[in-house]
Image (cartoon, grey):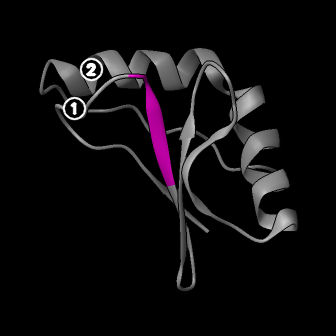
Amino acid sequence: MVITMNYNDHAPPHFYVRYGSQKALIGIESLSVLCGRLFPRILGLAVEWASLHRNELMVDWELARQQAVLNKIAPLE
């Protein structure tokens, strides 16, 4: 699973998840799929990870909007 965030991306705050050929855009605040599709197990892992790191994701979202270097966020353990 690869999780990314793009610089100067559109609102609402979100991140991207890619797993094989599947992709989804997940809202940081709602932790819901805004676009795309993932296997239920992969979506569950992504949402679990995001719920643990929601504040860090919002910090990175603001950094990305300012074209600043993003902080790395620990993987799910």
Q: Is residue 10 left or right of residue 34?
A: left
Q: Is residue 25 left or right of residue 52?
A: left
Vertically, is 41 above or below 22?
above
- Identified by mark 1, the residue type is Val
Q: Quadrant of the N terminus?
A: bottom right
Q: Position of residue 36 (x, y in %)?
A: 54, 60
Q: Is residue 50 left or right of residue 17?
A: right
SS class, disc 2: helix
- The structure residue drawn at horizontal position 31% and vertical position 15%, both measured from the top left corner, is 62
Image quarter of residue 29: top right
Q: Position of residue 35 (x, y in %)?
A: 52, 51
Say which of marks 1 and 2 sits in front. Answer: 2
Numbered badge on residue 63: 2
Q: Which residue is mark 1?
A: 69
Vertically, is 58 above or below 16?
above
Give the magenta part as a residue range.
12-16
Between residues 51 and 11, which one lies in front from this camera angle? Answer: 11
- The structure residue drawn at horizontal position 16% and vertical position 31%, both measured from the top left corner, is 8
Q: Residues within 10 Å of mark 2 (few under 14, many from 20)?
A: some
SS class, disc 1: loop
- The structure residue drawn at horizontal position 82% and vertical position 41%, both measured from the top left corner, is 48
Q: Is residue 71 left or right of residue 55?
A: left
- Looking at the image, do the residues carrying marks 1 and 2 touch, with CB atoms under 8 Å apart? yes
- Residue farthest toward the bottom in the current orientation of the protein: 21
The number of numbered badges drawn on the structure is 2
- Identified by mark 2, the residue type is Leu
Q: Residues within 10 Å of mark 1 (few under 14, many from 20)?
A: few
Q: Position of residue 34 (x, y in %)?
A: 55, 42
Between residues 52 and 28, which one lies in front from this camera angle? Answer: 28
Q: Is residue 27 magenta?
A: no
Vertically, is 56 above or below 22?
above
Mark toward the start of the polypeptide (1 vs 2) = 2
